[in-house]
């Protein structure tokens, strides 16, 4: 792993409507469902599901791009890392107000669903919560 | 014989119809281009998703006790058909072919003693099928693709299909949609989406271990293969529906463009013919008036 310092890994972020990102990066951190996973060149082949959270692209020792995904899948091989996500948001484009509004809306629809609240509504709340947190964290650090 | 005045009105009305059809053709052409781009943009996701499903399925022991979405219920008694039509007409045979194929399938399946349920996408399909098969329609989805097909549309339909399947309301689901071949040709395509047909394994699997590695990538899974597959399959279902909607939307605009092109041309022919008759009559009238004047003068 150590000798991989200068190497780059091909990173693809794909959504149903577009190939959102396809570039060479130093490292990506993906929000795996069982914890964040940093993918460097030479990573063992891995397939994982994602929880709602941030995909961070690292270049030259710092985060150059940060994207929010509501879930999805990631596949890592030694040469490439691929993230499949149904929705992607650039964190810089989301204001804390937007995030809060989305959370409020999600909670409302969950409450409206009542006892038979379906998994989709719960997922939406979880995603919105993660978004609020992510936005707060990134804004705070800047 | 029609009078000059009625001919003139006819010509005027045909001309204004022609204006409308040619405008519709123009609109359809630009929408078609956008729809094609959208279909193109969806391809990478679908291809990678399929590859991921294939590689999970390739791992040992997964296919035997796969989730129900893959294995099916083991029956095919209740069939869900999802005909994809448009909300608007004037698109040539676009909706008619889908409806005809749906009717044919219903007759065929019922002949085999199976129960058929319908989930109609698009207003035209629901309207046409309601008359004969109203009792079979379990749901409709409308207003799709008015401003381009969105993934959330496919997500919603997928969710309904999944919920129905989870509740045991059907055994097999098939989408019937128009595959876009070209602006003048759309192919009615039935595609089974539940149980998920096993994706074809690539002929040349990606070798991740270099030249002397194992023939197929050996992945680590987090969480287990089982859980990943359970999450992947609904995603795969949604993208299949999304692609069907995109293909259908491109086909719709293609069909409308062709239909409107023909209509514009027909209107042009008709205007030509009517103008010819109009001119002949005008001449005949002038001749008649001249004869009247001359014979009037001679009589004096």
Image (cartoon, grey):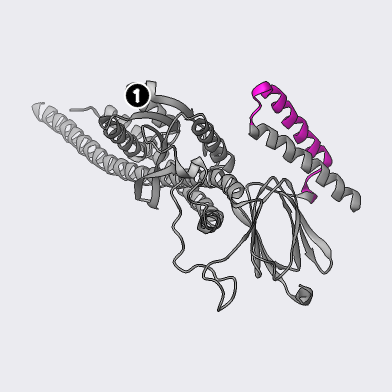
- Bin the neighbour count of mark 1 within 10 Å (Cα to Cα): few under 14, some 14-19, many 20 and up: some
The prevailing secondary structure element of the residues shown in magenta is helix
Identify which residue, B233 or B24, lies in the foreground.
Answer: B233
> Quick check: B14 above or below B137?
below
Note whether residue B23 is visible.
Answer: no
Where residue A111 sits: x, y (%)? 72, 24
> Quick check: A40 above or below A106?
below
**Which residues fall within the magenta stretch?**
A92-118
Identify which residue, A70 or B87, lies in the foreground.
Answer: A70
Identify which residue, B121 or B20, lies in the foreground.
Answer: B121
Where residue B212 sits: x, y (%)? 55, 78
A104 in the magenta segment: yes
Q: Which residue is mark 1?
A: B133
Identify which residue, B123 or B192, lies in the foreground.
Answer: B192
Q: Is residue B92 left or right of residue B64?
A: left
Q: Residue at x 84, y 67 (%)?
A: A61
Where residue B108 sits: x, y (%)? 27, 34
B102 in the magenta segment: no
């Amino acid at each position: 792993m150590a000798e991989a310092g200068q190497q780059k890994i091909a990173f693809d972020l794909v959504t149903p409507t577009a190939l959102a990102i396809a570039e060479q990066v130093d490292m990506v951190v993906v929000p795996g469902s069982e914890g964040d996973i940093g993918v460097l060149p030479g990573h063992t082949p891995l397939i994982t599901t994602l929880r709602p959270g941030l995909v961070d692209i690292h270049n030259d020792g710092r985060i150059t791009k940060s994207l929010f995904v509501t879930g999805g899948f990631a596949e890592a091989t030694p040469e490439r890392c691929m993230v499949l996500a149904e929705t992607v948001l650039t964190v810089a484009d989301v204001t804390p107000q937007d995030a809060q509004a989305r959370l409020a809306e999600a909670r409302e629809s969950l409450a409206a669903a009542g006892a038979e609240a379906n998994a989709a509504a719960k997922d939406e709340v979880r995603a919105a919560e993660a978004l609020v947190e992510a936005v707060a964290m990134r804004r705070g650090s800047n | 014989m029609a009078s000059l005045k009625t001919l003139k009105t006819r010509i005027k009305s045909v001309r204004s119809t022609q204006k409308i059809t040619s405008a519709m053709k123009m609109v359809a052409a630009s929408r078609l281009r956008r729809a094609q781009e959208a279909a193109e943009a969806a391809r990478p996701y679908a291809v990678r998703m399929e590859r991921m499903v294939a590689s999970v399925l390739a791992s040992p022991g997964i296919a035997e006790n796969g989730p129900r979405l893959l294995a099916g219920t083991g029956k095919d008694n209740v069939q869900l058909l999802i005909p994809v039509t448009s909300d608007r007409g004037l698109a040539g045979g676009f909706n008619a072919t889908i409806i005809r194929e749906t009717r044919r399938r219903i007759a065929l399946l019922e002949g085999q003693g199976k129960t058929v349920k319908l989930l109609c996408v698009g207003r035209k399909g629901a309207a046409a099928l309601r008359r004969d098969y109203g009792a079979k329609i379990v749901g409709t989805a409308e207003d799709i693709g008015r401003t381009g097909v969105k993934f959330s549309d496919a997500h919603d339909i997928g969710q309904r299909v999944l919920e129905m399947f989870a509740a045991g309301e059907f055994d097999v689901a098939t989408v019937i949609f128009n595959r876009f071949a070209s602006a003048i040709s759309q192919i009615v395509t039935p595609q089974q989406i539940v149980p998920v047909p096993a994706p074809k394994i690539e002929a040349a699997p990606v070798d991740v271990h270099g030249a002397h590695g194992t023939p197929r990538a050996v992945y680590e899974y987090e969480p287990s293969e089982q859980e990943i597959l359970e999450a992947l399959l609904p995603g795969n279902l949604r993208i299949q529906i999304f692609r069907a909607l995109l293909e259908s939307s491109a086909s719709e605009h293609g069909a409308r463009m062709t239909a409107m092109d023909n209509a514009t041309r027909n209107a042009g022919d008709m205007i030509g013919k009517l103008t010819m008759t109009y001119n002949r009559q005008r001449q005949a009238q002038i001749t008649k008036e001249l004869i009247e004047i001359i014979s009037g003068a001679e009589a004096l």
